[in-house]
Every structure is written in structure tokens, then in C-alpha cells.
Image: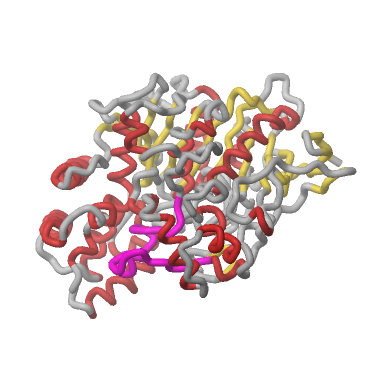
Amino acid sequence: MVEVKVQQGWLRGEKLDTVTGDGQYYSFKGIPYAQPPLGKLRFKAPLPPLPWDGVREAKEHGAKCPQIDIFSFVFQPGNEDCLHLSVYTPELTPEVPLPVIVFIHGGCFKSGSGNSKNYAGDFLVSRGVILVTMNYRLDALGFLCLDTEEVPGNAGMKDQVAALRWVRDNIRNFGGDPANVTLMGHSSGAACAGLHLLSPMSKGLFNRVIIMSGSPTCDWAVPFEPQKRAFILGKELGLETDDPSILLEFLQNVPVENLINTSPYVLSFEERNDNILKMVHFTPVIEKNFGQEQFLTDDPIKLLKDGKINDVDVFLGHTSEESLIYISTFEEYLKKLILSHNRYPEILVPRKIQLMCTAKQILDLSKRIHDFYFEGKSINIDTMKEFIRYCSDAGYIYDINSFMSKLAKVGSGRRYMYRFSGISDRNIYGNPGLKYGIKGAGHLDDMVHLMPTQLVKVKLEKNSKAYDLIQLTTTVFSNFAKYGNPTPDASLGVTWPKYDSTNQAFVDIGDTLTVGSHPAGEALDFWRSIYEEVRLDY
């Protein structure tokens, strides 16, 4: 029996064996960190958690938020009472409090959970750190914006803040150090982590941040007319009104499944751009000030340029071939492009440029982009390699690098950058590219070497390439969480250089660590010239 007392009451967890069989750790799952956002609390900022009597069992995960799975496209009903987190710790009473990693899962702001099916703690707790994962509200439930005092937007982001506050107040009881907390996010979770760097609500709640394969400036993370989108959602569900109070009451009473995976297009061209590399309907937004706690007070780029950041150490990076994760989707997509004779060249232009430019500019830019990536060849199955490179650069890598270069110009915190190119039999997202001659790590292939997932069916053997890559990757990430430096000593064979906007230094994580500079190379220069031409500061 393993019991821990937190501010709300007693928890009963369990002691588990690690998947590698060489250690044990303590697990506490399904811990409520806020009140259930039900009924009149739907869409609103979370309220502090309520106490309970007796001992609460913490051996099973709480419900995930209702959602559509973005890979299987299957509706998962979950439950709106989803504001739970899990704590995995190697020791409950260490001699010295342990560093803590708080993880924000990805999934396009509309899918996923922090549950151990996808993100277990075994690898990281073996490195002497505590891992906290969370569920937060997704899709319209978490990111509807009415531009009103009641629903200014960002409920899902405020859920994350509530989880961080819970960690601050309770993690010491699990052996953790509340003064040594690293926030880590992947994909849309990385965009969230980047926004926590800019949020006054998050100030003082973490000491370091790890931003993996995403940024607040990626096309899919940038909002457009969020209040209009909310009213269009209401119209699609049967209510036409211009009164936000009437809309709120209506949306708080519709069945939850009607709010999941909707497509409230504000402009007709959004329908053709509706893919997870270009747009997500409900995302974090800039909040109007009604006297409430504002999560995001201004445009992220402006906040960065003005130096309005939570000045902490940052570790940021991406995989070598991000878009390989979508290769099966791309196969179907390219077939449709062939059938339409590549009729719409503007699809190559990032959505945030399309929103700001004339049709003539968009067509001219699309030709430049096509020439740069495809060199006059048609976009089809035979140019899959070029298409993957385009999607990786336009959907992830340019914006990640651009965010880092801006971040490096402000604050005094240390900045480190990585590229993950490691390959093992755990690369379930990147290895399907081999049939097209594409060798590399896809989106999420770094995560499967940091946290065990049930999606990887290959048994993990010691003395295997996968095991060695897990050891290397978890050492690098846990070092940063412990010391604010991925290589605090010479044990890994390299000294990780700090990133600045001039040297653009990074380290490639492969079979070994390799120091390099300018990770995006020519592509970064190309996209910078595109944004400069249209006078957009991305």
C-alpha cells in the first residue's frame, strides 16, 4: 500500500516495475487538479479542486476529454470531467528533492491524453526525475472563444496552468522539488509550452521548458477570427444569433458529441486548407481584458520582440523528417491532387500568408515554393520525398527555427537546440518512409524513445539499438531538467553549445551526439525571404 497526502486529501497509488525490468517506481493516476468543468462551467476557466473524504484510489487514469482520434478518426466519448493528472516518481522520500518534468501532450489541440497508454513514465523516472502528465480540455471545449468575460478563450491553457499550480503546491509530497520544474510539450503541446513562456499566468510555475516539434507560430497554431468561428459553430448546430450570452447558453446545453471535430469555416478557402498541417479550428487566442486572469495578452511575436517572456532556460528542437508521420495520409492526398491535375497551386502557401495577401501575390509565391521544392516536377507519388520535405519545412521546421532565433535575442536564460534523427525499430512514425527512400525520424519518433507507448509493439531488448537510443535520449533530456544543460559533463562525449541567432548551434541526436550549426540550412533562408517579401514577421 502506497499512500500520499495532498492538499485535497489522501491518495492511494501503487509501486510498479519498469518496462525494462531493472527498477521500480511509484505511480499515482487520475488525480483531480481542478473541479469538473460541467454544466455552466463548460468553456470557462477551471476552478480549484475540491477536497475528498477518506483515501482516493489513484491506480487508474481519469477520463480523457471527449475527442476524435486524429489518426483513426474514431470518436472517443471520454468525459467532460477530465481534469486529472498522473505522477510517476522513483522515490517518495529522497534525501534531496527530485527535479520534476510536467508534460503537455500534443494532438492538434483536439486529440490525445497524458495517459500511460501513450506517455508512460518508466524511462524518465529511471533517470531520477519525476514525471507529471495531464489531461486538459480539447477542441471547442478547451478553446472556444466568445470574446466575453465569461468565455474569453484559452480554457484549455488555463487547465494547464491549474495543473502547474497543483504541482507547485503538492509535488513535494511525492519527493519532488517545486523549485526545479521543467515544462515539456510536444507538437501542439510544444506550441502550448511556447505560450507558457509568454503568459503572465504561468510566471514562476516552471524553471525550464522543453519545446518539441512545434511552436506557437506554426500555421496550425495561429488563430483566425475566433469569435466569428464560435458564432458559425452555433449556426451549424442550429442557432443563429449575434448575442454571445444566448450562444453560450445554447452551446452549454448541446450534447458534447456535437462539439467535437466540427468544421466552422470562417472563409471558404479554409475548407481546402483544412488539414492538420495548415489549420486547426479551435486554438489558443489573444484574450481581451475584462479584468480576468489573461493567459495570452498580445500576439506571441510581439511579446517575444518586446521581451515580455518568462525568462527561463529553453531546450527546443524537432525531428529530422517531421512529416513522415502523415505518409499514409499523404498517399491518399496526392492521389486526389493527381485527379485534380494539381489544380490549386496556392495550397503550397502557408495559411497565415494566404490570410494577409492578394490572390496575385499568393499565386506568385506558390510558384516560387513549387520551384524551390519540386524544381518543375509535378506533385505526385513520384515526388513523395520532395513533398515530405516541403511539408516538414512549411508545417514545422521553419517556424520552430524562427521562434528560437527570436527567443535567443531576449532574456538571459540558456538556449539549446536539438535535432532528433535517431533510428531504431521503435520509429513507427518514420520507418514507413523507407519504401520511398526516405530515411529519418518522423514526428513523435523522439517521444517513443523518451516515454514508453503501447503503440510500439516491438519488445524492448537490452543491448539493442533501441535500448541504446533510449538511454542516450533520456539522459540528454533529464540532464536538461536537472541542470539546465543537456551535457553538464563530458560523459556523453560532446559539450552542447548554447544557441544564439548568429551561430544557430544545435546537436543532432542519432546513434551518438553530433554538433552542428544552421539546422534548417537553405530552407530556412528561403522561407525567411518569403515572409520578408510579404512583410510578415514570422
Residue 364 visible in the current orientation = yes
Residue lying farthest right? 54
Q: Quadrant of residue 206?
A: top right
Point 47% across, 21% down: residue: 488
* Viewer-proximal residue among 269 and 399: 269
Tell me how the rendering is colored.
secondary structure
Q: Is residue 420 left or right of residue 241?
A: left
- Assess whether residue 240 is covered by the magenta stretch: no
Q: Is 268 in the magenta?
A: yes
Q: Position of residue 7 (x, y in %)?
A: 78, 34
Report which quarter residue 378 is drawn in.
Answer: bottom left
Please state if 349 lies on the left or on the right of 471 as rendered: left
Which residue is depicted at the point 55% across and 38% down?
A: 292
- Residue displayed at 46% across by 43% down: 287
Q: Which image quarter is the N terminus in?
A: top right
Q: Can residue 457 be seen here?
A: no
Which residue shows up at 52% across the image and 28% down it?
Answer: 203
| Left or right, 261 with reference to 495 | right
Residue 451 position, x and y percent, is 56, 46
Depth check: 182 or 83 in front? Answer: 83
* Magenta stretch bounds: 260-283
Quarter occupied by the C terminus: top left
Is residue 94 placed above or below 394 in the rendered structure?
above
Compared across the picture, whether 374 is left or right of 330 comes to left
Q: Residue furthest front?
A: 243
The image shows residue 8 at horizontal and vertical percentages of 79, 38
Vertical order, 223 against 15 (above or below): below
Q: Position of residue 392 (x, y in %)?
A: 30, 53
Could you tell me what secondary structure mostly forms the magenta stretch?
Answer: loop
